[in-house]
Image (cartoon, coloured by chain):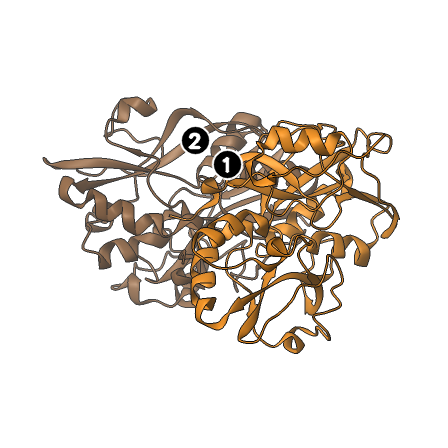
Chain colours: A brown, B orange
Amino acid sequence: MNEPASPADPAALTPGEARALFRAGLRAPTAGYSAGYTQANLLALPRDLAFDFLLFAQRNPRSCPVLDVTDPGAVDASIFAGDLRTDLPEYRVYRDGAQVDAPADVSDVWRPDLVAFLIGCSFTFEAPLLRAGVPVRHIEQGRNVPMYTTNRPCRPAGRFSGPLVVSMRPVPADQVADAVRVTARYPSVHGAPVHVGDPAALGIGDLAEPDFGDPVDVRPGEVPLFWACGVTPQAAVMASAPPFAIAHAPGHMAVTDVADTRYQAP
Amino acid sequence: MNEPASPADPAALTPGEARALFRAGLRAPTAGYSAGYTQANLLALPRDLAFDFLLFAQRNPRSCPVLDVTDPGAVDASIFAGDLRTDLPEYRVYRDGAQVDAPADVSDVWRPDLVAFLIGCSFTFEAPLLRAGVPVRHIEQGRNVPMYTTNRPCRPAGRFSGPLVVSMRPVPADQVADAVRVTARYPSVHGAPVHVGDPAALGIGDLAEPDFGDPVDVRPGEVPLFWACGVTPQAAVMASAPPFAIAHAPGHMAVTDVADTRYQAP
């Protein structure tokens, strides 16, 4: 299958159009796609692990805000009128906590006992950030957002434990307050930053070497802002080694049918 | 055991003092107790039903906002430094969906496989309502809050389904906006009203005959405001008939150690 070309204006695509491109084989980070629509992290786990994971998410709401959960075996969700096995640009397949594949389609490994969790993604608040005049560097640079594993443990639950993962966006010092204010209004998609400034305080050695995604330029006068990231569930899979799991590739999200305004706090 | 006298100033009790009174046998609705502290609904279910219920709560966040979940067998919780079996004023014990007991202590029927869910309660935002000058009639009248089963179904999940239950507070017409504004800031404890005005639209026939709690006076010029209520999980137990469940008696809540400000939206 030939990979389709990247669209000229990804922000203008409807969620259905974006999903059709990904279903056809396009592999691309979804930041900037379908502006105004909520994006979501995916984690699918066997039913017998579903309570432990849902509890892990409940105990770590900043990093794991649950937007939707499928019934076992379902491949669509109330917020996602597509096929979870094909309509994300890229996946990660884990066995015993180790990544064993990175396909563009997981139809052949999907199982009827899987429960899929859709978890809020900070890409959702990037359109509001841009509307507020706050630059979003990885969109400017056409890259995936940089993500880092931190030294902060999540609250464990049953079989799941692991570190907090964060995404980073550099923001000019005089716009940090705007970035906090805007993102705080979206608690279901990670909300306000968990940390502002020194990466070392989170155990991050070098911003130029993210654990997931791509590095972006941090310019003089800019402050790195760190938001809890929906890759945290994948870090929990790596740390906790459930027998089987399917996740999205970091930055390659489920584009949902729900307007970002639904997740705006009053 | 003689029941202790009601305290002269329940609002001034610390959560630990309130729990000690209830542990000693006081049976009283907790509205107005320990002002500034979060109160919570209790539902304890066998571990094998815990995922279905947690998913039911996730799908019905207005009525079932989960504040904390215990590990199986635990009798305290991160937000509740007491004993869940003894420190609420009154309980309901259900078998196959039917209430079989209404004791002040459930130590003798508690089981090691129980997972306890603590769910936000609208009593939490009553102190902020009072600070904003909005009257809270059931506190004024020294009664339990009136609660009604509605004709609105919850979104089902696994074995659980059932109707939305609401609490009602009458508010003077010129303070309805204040009541909405204040309570909307507390989404984890039911947030803004789900309905303002005509009870018939919710299938409520007579405000003077609540399904749970006590009736309160609705005065000329007042509008009934309806908030999603944490008795909804108990209605789901009645409708879904799990083999075993323990809940609080409606209005007789778990008084937690957490300030209500923790659940205030930014």
Residue at position x 50%, y 48% in the image: B127
Q: Chain of mark 1?
A: A
Residue furthest toward the front? B8
Callout 1 crowding tier (Cα within 10 Å): few <14, some 14–19, many ≥20: some
Q: Quick one: label 1 or label 2, which is nearer the N terminus?
A: 1
Front tag of 1 and 2 = 1
Say which element carries label 1.
Answer: loop
Image position, residue A20 (x, y; %): 43, 64
Image quadrant of residue A127?
bottom left
Q: CA distance from mark 1 to mark 2?
A: 9 Å
Q: Are marks 1 and 2 in contact (CB under 8 Å)?
A: yes
* Residue carrying label 1: A60
Where residue B165 sits in the image (x, y, percent)?
68, 61
Q: Which mark is residue A164?
A: 2
Residue A245 is situated, as x and y percent measured from the top left of the image, at 58, 39
**Are there few (<14), some (14-19), or many (20+) residues within 10 Å of tag 2?**
many
Residue A118 appears in the rendering: no
